[in-house]
Image (spheres, rainbow, N blue to C red):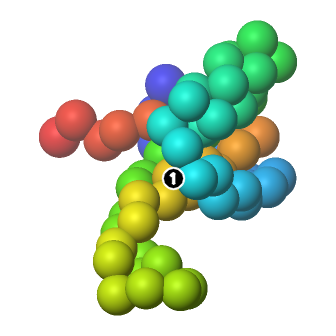
Amino acid sequence: MSEDLAPTAQVLSTVVYDSAAEAIEAIAAADTLGLGIKVANRLVPEEESEDLVEEWVVEILTAVPTVDES
C-alpha cells in the first residue's frame, strides 16, 4: 500500500497507568477491539517524597500505526 493511501491513526484516548500490569490490560483490550496503541514509560517525581516512580502512558489509536521501513 502506498503512503498516500495509508490511513492516519487518530488518538482516541491517552491514559496514564501506575503499573505495567494495568497498561498490559489496556493493551490487550485494544488488541481485542482491533485498535492501535502507542506505549511509553516515564519516571516522574513522587508527590510526597523525592523518589521517582514509573508511569505507563498508553495511547489508544483508531488504527494500528505503521513504520516506514525505507
Q: Residue at x 31, y 41 (%)?
A: 68
Q: Position of residue 15 (x, y in %)?
A: 71, 56
Q: Position of residue 52 (x, y in %)?
A: 34, 73
Using the image as rendered, state which of residue 13 and residue 68 is in the foreground: 13
Q: Is residue 58 above or below residue 63?
A: below
Q: Residue at x 70, y 44 (%)?
A: 61
Crowd class of label 1 (few under 14; some 14 to 19; many from 20; radius 10 Å) = many
Q: Position of residue 23 (x, y in %)?
A: 60, 37
Q: Is residue 16 above or below residue 49?
A: above
Amino acid found under the numbered disc labelled 1? Trp
Q: Is residue 66 above or below residue 52?
A: above
Disc 1 is placed on an element classified as strand
Q: Quadrant of the C terminus?
A: top left
Q: Residue furthest left?
A: 70
The residue beneath circle 1 is: 56
Q: Position of residue 44 (x, y in %)?
A: 42, 77
Q: Residue furthest front?
A: 49
Q: Is residue 35 above or below residue 47?
A: above
Instruction: Write down the quadrant of residue 60 in the picture.
Output: top right
Using the image as rendered, state which of residue 20 and residue 39 is in the foreground: 20
Using the image as rendered, state which of residue 49 and residue 30 is in the foreground: 49
Q: Is residue 30 left or right of residue 55?
A: right
Q: Is residue 10 visible?
A: yes
Q: Is residue 6 visible?
A: no
Instruction: Write down the quadrant of residue 16 in the picture.
Output: bottom right
Q: Is residue 34 left or right of residue 16?
A: right
